[in-house]
Amino acid sequence: MKNYVVIGEKWKRAIVFTSEYYADYYMAKNCPGVCCEKYSEADFNSTFGQRAHTVLEYGINDYNAQALILIGD
């Protein structure tokens, strides 16, 4: 399931959704003209797992987002 959406080119951040459906829904509404890519949890961890990151949990929201991950260098 590809439920991680990585946003940005220079300043990367990821949003973790409860399902791939909500990741697709978010990307359709918010990513035109913005660099967005979907990852599975395993792919995300292999690509960004060694980089510093901060995890911020979301409350209830329209996109069923669970967390925002700020990805460092």
Image: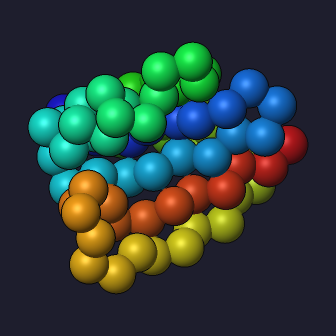
Identity of the residue drawn at 43% across and 36% down = 30
> Which of the 4 quarters of the picture holds residue 35?
top right
Q: Position of residue 57 (x, y in %)?
A: 45, 76
Q: Position of residue 69 (x, y in %)?
A: 57, 57
Identity of the residue drawn at 33% across and 66% down = 66
Left or right relative to 8: residue 10: right
As drawn, 7 above or below 37: below
Quadrant in which the N terminus appears:
top left
As drawn, 18 above or below 58: above
Left or right relative to 70: residue 26: left
Of 62 and 10, nearer the camera is 62
Quadrant in which the C terminus appears:
top right
Left or right relative to 68: residue 61: left
Tell me if I can see residue 40 in this picture.
no
> Which of the 4 quarters of the picture holds residue 59?
bottom left
Identity of the residue drawn at 58% across and 35% down = 7
Left or right relative to 61: residue 73: right
